[in-house]
Image (cartoon, grey):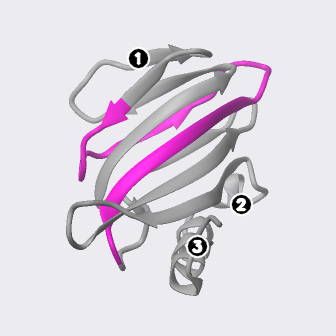
Amino acid sequence: MPKLPSARKCAALALTLALLPPSLALAQVKRTPVLTADVAAPGREAVVVRGEIDPGANAPRHTHPGDEISYVIEGEVALLIDGEPPRIIKAGEAFVVPAGKVHGARNDSGAPVRFVGVYVVDKGRPLATPAR
């Protein structure tokens, strides 16, 4: 049976969402935890999320305490990694953001972006931290 996210993870996600700019507070960017499970590396865990970015919405700049591996199921998104040119990721494509790398995303289309994200992160840390 899948392990559900801990109360601490849910609280951390709620805090991260609360720190989003008011323009995003109406759930324009959603991450719904699907599974949290231990991995072979001590002190690390995998977090699988189902995500959605509404048309015209931005996922603000942030970091993760581990690698992000995501697959776009529907739509297309501009991946904005600091120090790199924007990359357009389309349905059927995947991307990796290394641990600690500041990044965001932008949905310039008229359709939602749906993705599955897998984060291999340090246990006990928030899944995402807003970047300054």
Pointer 1 residue = 87
- The location of residue 35, given as percent across then percent down, is 58, 60
Q: Give the label, 3 or 1, closer to the camera.
A: 3
Work out how far the residue at label 3 is from the one at label 2, CA to CA, in angstroms.
22 Å
Highlighted magenta segment, given as a residue range: 96-123
**Label 1 vs 2, first from the N-terminus:** 2
Tell which of 11 and 132 is nearer to you.
11
Of residues 88 and 4, the one drawn nearer to the viewer in this rendering: 4
Please name the residue shown 58% across and 15% down the image. 92
- Look at the numbered disc 2 and give the secondary structure of its residue: loop
Q: What amino acid is at disc 1?
A: Arg
In the rendered image, is residue 63 in sight? no
Amino acid identity at mark 2: Ala
In the picture shown, does residue 38 fall above or below 76? Answer: below
Residue 1: image location, x then y, percent: 65, 66
Q: Residue at position x 21%, y 62% from top?
A: 41
Which is more foreground, mark 3 or mark 2?
A: 3
Q: Position of residue 110 (x, y in %)?
A: 79, 20
In the rendered structure, which disc, 3 or 2, sits on the residue that comes first in sequence? Answer: 3
Which label sits on residue 25?
2
